[in-house]
Amino acid sequence: MSFITVQNVSHIYHAGEEQEHRALSDISLSVEEGEFVAILGTNGSGKSTLARHINGLLLPSSGHVLVDGMDTQETENIWNIRREVGMVFQNPDNQIIAAVVEDDVAFGPENIGMAPDRIRKNVHEALETVGMTHFRSFAPHLLSGGQKQRIAIAGALAMQTKCLVLDEATAMLDPRGRQEVMETIQRLHREAHITILLITHFMEEAVKADRILVLNKGEVFASGTPREIFSQGEALENIGLELPLASRVAGALAGQGIPLTDTILTKEELAAALRELYETR
């Protein structure tokens, strides 16, 4: 059984009212334990609605969401699901609870009644994992946006979460902050084998995933590896998405007669291709 299974899920906001809106329409998908999946789509595509179903913040209007075999529709499962699935949202300031970093990381474990010795151990290990041990006694408002998001990730890790869902978690950060967060989640995926669901509008972030899921108007538009998805440039543009910057630059150069392949996704691949062209001339 997959770690996350979404079975024929629809979600309707304000059902039966004048402003009724169908955000998800009969979606089915699965995520394996330890997988890194990026979810792309324009505003209103259903990305955030889907994210909030994964740990029971929203419940389906129809269909089922199973996390590690537990159905989010069953009330007795919710606490266990939220222990296994940690959420990191867009605005880091909205996630800060305490006046001191280590107290903030400890909030979740304390809230579920974890033993004090276990909390101290988990908090220490979580801060160490995200590279924030030095800041354990700092006031959160003194931290940068990227550091605050790493604290939010540490809070989830202290709960011994198996899965992180990041809902546009880098959208409000500067380039350095985005890099800090991306390096952290890539390391967690690589070294701790944590399942990652990354909702993002940065194509360069999606390239780092094992698999990309594209949503459009509440439905699954495409699913595949980054190279498979971004080979569909015209189809993506038709639904309002664009290729990664390196792909667009490579395409523009190819249009000027420079012989570059259409499979370039990252700046590293672009630099290597250009260097190889230069060295063979």
Image (cartoon, rainbow, N blue to C red):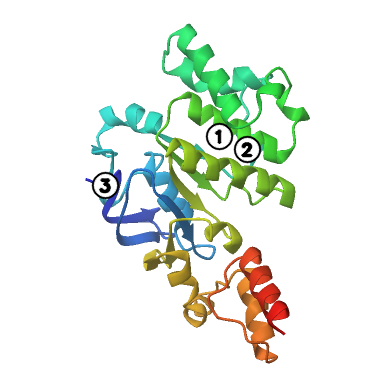
What secondary structure is marked by label 3? loop
Residue lying at 61% horizontally and 68% vertically, measured from the top left: 269
Disc 3 to disc 1, how far (Cα)?
Answer: 23 Å
Mark 2 Cα shell of 10 Å, populated few (<14), some (14-19), many (≥20): many
**Extreme front residue here?**
280
Give the left or right position of residue 14, taking residue 8 as reference: right
Mark 1 Cα shell of 10 Å, populated few (<14), some (14-19), many (≥20): many
Indicate the quadrant where residue 12 lies. Answer: bottom left
Numbered label attached to residue 2: 3
Whether residue 174 is visible, yes or no, is no
Whether residue 270 is visible, yes or no, is yes
The residue type indicated by label 2 comes to Gln
What secondary structure is marked by label 1? helix
Disc 1 to disc 2, how far (Cα)?
Answer: 6 Å
Give the left or right position of residue 87, taking residue 169 as reference: left
**Mark 3 in CB contact with mark 2 (< 8 angstroms):** no
Mark 3 Cα shell of 10 Å, populated few (<14), some (14-19), many (≥20): some
**Extreme bottom residue here?**
257
Foreground mark, 3 or 2? Answer: 3
Numbered label attached to residue 149: 2
Q: Position of residue 227 (x, y in %)?
A: 47, 69
> What residue is disc 1 on?
153
